[in-house]
Amino acid sequence: MIYKRLLLSLLCLGSLCCIAPAMDLDLDLPVLPIAEPPADTFVLDSPLQVRVHIDGKPQLLLGMDQGRLRLVFPDQPDAEVMLPLDAPGIQLSYEPPEPYNQLALEQSLGNHRLVIDSMEPYASSLLPLLIVDAAQCNFHAIYLRYYQSIVAIADLGRAVKITDGLPHSAWSAGYLEQAQKLLGRCITEGNVEGAERLLAMMHTVMDEGDFAPVGFAAADALRARGEYPLTARIYGSLAGSSDRLLRERALLWAGYSSAVAGDLEAAEKVLDAVPEMKRDNPNFLTYSLARGRLHMAHGDYDQALYYLSRAMVLTSVNATFKPELYYLLIRGHRERGEDGAALRLYNELKIFYPESPWMQKSESDRITTG
Amino acid sequence: MRVFKADSIPVRLLWLALLFLIASARLGAAFEELSLPQLRDELKKGLVAGDLIRLRPVLNELSARTDGEPEREGYVFLLGLSYQDEFSVNQEAATLRKAMDYYRQYVDWFPQGTRRAYVRFNLAGAHADLGEFEEAMQHYDWLYRRSKNAVLRQESRDRMCRLYMKHDRAADGVPLFLEVFNAAVLDEELRAQAASWLLQGYLAAGNVDAISPYLRYLTGDTEAVYDPNFNITLLKAGDQLFDEEAYDQAILLYSFVKPKSQIVAFYGALTEKLRKKLSYLSPESDQHTILSGRLQTAESNLSALESVREYEVDMHWRVARVYLETERNWEALWAFYFLYQDYPEHPQREEFAYICFCEARATGNTELTAKLAKAYLGEEGFLKYRNQVTLGLADAYLDSGDEMAFIQLAKGYFNEPEDHLTAAQLINKWALLISAKARYQSLRDEMQPLVTQLAGREPAFEAARYWYALAQLLLAECSAASASFEEFVGDYTDGNSLFAEDANYRYGIALFGEARNADAEAQFLSFIERYPGSRLRGEAELYLGDLKFARGADDQAIEHYGQVDVYTDLQEFISKAVFAISEVHLAAGRGDAAFDVIQDYLERYGDEAYAAQGKYRLGMVRASQGQAVERFRIHSEAIRDLGNDPSRHAVDRLVLGYVSDFTRLDESYAVSIRLLERLIAEPLFCHDFLVDRGFQYRFLQSEEGQRVDASLRHALVRDRAVRATLIESESVTAEAVEYRLREMLEDYEARAEALAIYDAGNFFADLYAESVLESSDKIMELRARMALDELGQIPEGLPAVQDEELQDASPALLLWQADAHLENLPDRAKELYAAVVQRYPFAESAPAALEALAEIALDEARSSDEGTEAWEQALGYYELLAQWTTAGSLSAMPLLRKAEVLVHLGRGAEAIETLGSVLKNPSWRGLDHAKAHLELGKLYMQQEQWREAHGFFERLIVAYGGYLETVAWAYYYDLKTLEALNEAESVELLLAEYRTRIAALRETEAHQRIVDAYDL
């Protein structure tokens, strides 16, 4: 479930400080930046006509002042009203100019451009207003339609900027699902900056248990693309978790990433902060992988194979890091001149994961080393 | 809610649809009497209640009354449906067949009926329920190919796929599976499902090669990969491939097999999830119907799993064996390790543990090997492979350099040997370890107790005895070694000993070392006869050559030397034999033959030949033939060709020999020329020199005279023919003498001029300059520099040789640098001496380095007041040096020094033994024997064994009287001994004898002690 950190981001530092004593402070891991929430005081570019259900009459919504609605009646432009959101019975509704169902149909047919163009005139006004609780307005559902099309086809910079403007309280499951899609696009299309912005927002608005699978999956994909600095920041942020297993898993991956990046001192420091693991530990495979990678970075291929082959035997074909494991084992065997084993693993990698970046890396290693 | 069989699910959908279609119908109560509208009304009411079976009479009536009318089509359909509903309750085939009759009627009567697709769908389902594959497929195929309803088309297609699987006709389904697969581009779950079908289809068709492209679609976490049938198919196909030894393909399939526990967990979670979802859905909704079907499939899979026997361990075992067979050692190791850990009750657990240990060895990871070996040995019930594991553990310790752990293991095993063969192998490993480090004394001391401890426990006893004897031989304790080997070869023959052949050979060496040449010859001949094809034959032939040569049987010697390269490929022995043949020829005055044999060898073996040694000898042969210049030509060329190769240590001998011999010869020529010039210029000197033998002797004994060239000396002193031309007489005029002398002078001037081309200073200065310019010629540079140093011609201001320059230096170069530092940087010198010994323990320079180290240690020990540590260190060096001191060594000094150190350490018995070994070697007769007698006497004095002490002193005085210093001490100590024996008369007699020798002994150190103590 999404943990709403409404305006609590300032407290994030405090909460991190609370977590920090559980970690080794000397590790000094890089972390994702904290996403600041959009302002709760703003003036809309053009007033939005809404119905406030206290009396059901249309009113013009001018903006917000410290979380309170700034409204005027169309016929009384000088009589501005400040309406707190917690006023009893407050219910806002906006009626889009075009038939909403028609837009839904167009979207289902993949006509995202039409959706965006149609909703453009009022979408930017709705965005900051998503600070209003979804239970008190119909803005969220309307804007989600727009956001879905933005995520589907818009320029990544624009899509990320729009996401950045989402009030933290607005990150419902629907928005989160779209943001994850957008994150996927950013990674696939190589927009690392955008990916980092999105991850920072998600890390800020989601609770650690929800963010962990998103973060680890993103890090997997980024690692495969060689984006180690951002990967390290994701792991660094996850390492701040109060959940021991989650924290250790993040530390293991952080150590792994440092080893890959060639920062062996940092890798050792981080991995030494994780106790030796036995097979019943859920992080045992990650532990083996990280330790193996560190030994490989040291050029100790014997010990590298010790750990990596152990992980290999215990990892099923659907594990996210299985292709990576294949790649590393192939490399280890090649370095030791065990060409038979390397070739067999290479053939399996090619059959099981022909499109994996690790397959491509292995292939290019093979060509390079002959 | 009624439960429908999987194939009947759409029936429910259609029934609901029909409810809507006939909503306007009216029906009455008494069917035959009711009007058509009333019947319709009755039907409507019944449909609302949802009980088609009860409505069957109404439907029959309606069907009969509407014969020939379009309306009848709906009633026929509902009649079929009613029987299908009934079948779902009673599961009687007859009921279902009735339903099918109605459906067939429908198809016949209403080929264009609106419900024809649903009817065919139900008809297909009914056939499927009855196991009528062909009929079911016919109807599904019709729907898939012709129906305009996309849902029905897709469902029919999927059902056909499942039918192929259900009826074990997966191979036939491949074309359809491919259609599904190609249509599922955007549906990951369906694509995985289709891939799994294709896999099974190709496997059933025996087309294993076709599966590879589809495996990638099974790496996701989809429902398809948890299908029990799919997993069992993979397992079976994997097993078949495994049995066919197609391991690489087998592992592809095994990789996807899920453990039963995972499948159970998956379907457990899935059924729970589906039930939960269903609880939120209306029973009449399409979604509910679809999820019901999925739930039923999941439950059916779950219950099917109950009858599947546990296959996890077998599968893991197979996978592990695939790793093993395909030499994926690391993965095999872990796979077997986890089998060993995870299945404590498995009957093959011991095999698991043993294989994983073997794989650890194959990876070369000694730490893991040791860990796994200990784990195996720690299991009480594990007996089958204890010996192999024990030996493997021993190897792991040895490979990791953990000698202490190895010794602990071996000694522990010797205390309670479970298997004597294993004990023997441990002994062999241990002995090889010690021998490789040249710690022969340690080898002897470790093996000695085992000879007693393991007596009678063959073959461990045999191994201990062999290594004990070999250690004695390597320590040059030849007498003890020959005795041990004699016993050994007496007790063991080829049939019962691994070492018989080697022992027979070593026995010959021990006899040779003992200088029992005749026995040695006999033993080697016996060895050759007994082991004509032995790998040691070549070396034995070499010994036989030496023995024959030593007793003057030159031809036989050459014959044996000539056999060496027939029986060995080792250059060390081949070259020795060739050089020995050359020596035989040379000794017989056949210089050219001596030269040719080496020349042939160098040409024959090319780069493999010991070229530096060969060329050194070639030069020396020419020198012995009086061709000194040719010698330096050969040697200078050899130095240029081979001088930069650090592995050719004999180049150092070439260099140092060049320097010393050139200097000597050059001086000799200069002195000879001066002598001849003087003989010409000074007729009186010439006359005295040639005629006055006393004058001549005095001149030639002078420093300059000693350096006169040997051939000139011979000509002037011994050669009568020459002398006759040089002494003026009636027939020889002064002019003729001068003419002859000038001829000789010109000859020497010519020789000196020819020699000057190979001037050592110029040659090595040029070589040094060239090698400095050529940065890769570092070793050449050092060798040239060493030569210049020896010549005293090192260029001024040259920086000291750096450590890195000595990285690859030969032993002689290291020794040269060590000597250079001895005075000013003794610690650096010690390091370099130690480097010689450590890096090149068998090099020619090693004894010199050891001697230097020993002398330094002895000096330190003598000047140190602190304990015995310094003495122990000195002893260590002398012990190593003693190993170099064989019976053929020129001096017994190392043994005498060792004895001295042993005395200081209070180890008198060992000192006596050491000195005794000196006396046993006849080649050390003379000063070495004299010193040994003296020290033995002193030792017995210390032990107050006066008679024994007197015996040694007496023998020394009698037999070695010429060694004044030693014999004077013998008098002194013998006097003291006789006093201790209270033999005053003997003292007086000895003093009287001493007085007769005072003139000779007056200058000795001991004389003053005797003067102080006795009245002479």
Image: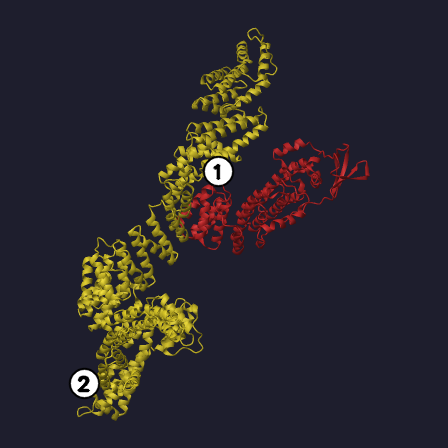
Q: Quadrant of residue B1004?
A: bottom left
Report if residue B945 is visible in the image. yes
Mark 2 → mark 1, Cα distance in angstroms: 109 Å
Is residue B150 visible to us here?
A: no
Q: Earlier in the sequence, mark 2 or mark 1?
A: 1
Residue B436 in which image quadrant: bottom left
Q: Residue at x 59, y 48 (%)?
A: A240
Residue picked out by circle 2: B720
In the displayed structure, does residue B459 sit left or right of residue B57?
A: left
In the rendered image, the residue lying farthest to the front is: B982
Pick whichever, B182 or B575, lies toward us.
Answer: B575
Residue type at mark 1 is: Tyr
Q: Colour of chain B?
A: yellow
Q: Is residue B981 above or below residue B806?
A: below
Q: Is residue B543 above or below residue B352?
A: below
Which residue: 55% across, 43% down? A217
Q: Dot 2: within a 10 Å radius of its alpha carbon, few (fewer than 14), some, or many (20 or more) residues? A: few
Q: Are marks 2 and 1 on the same chain?
A: yes
* Callout 2: chain: B
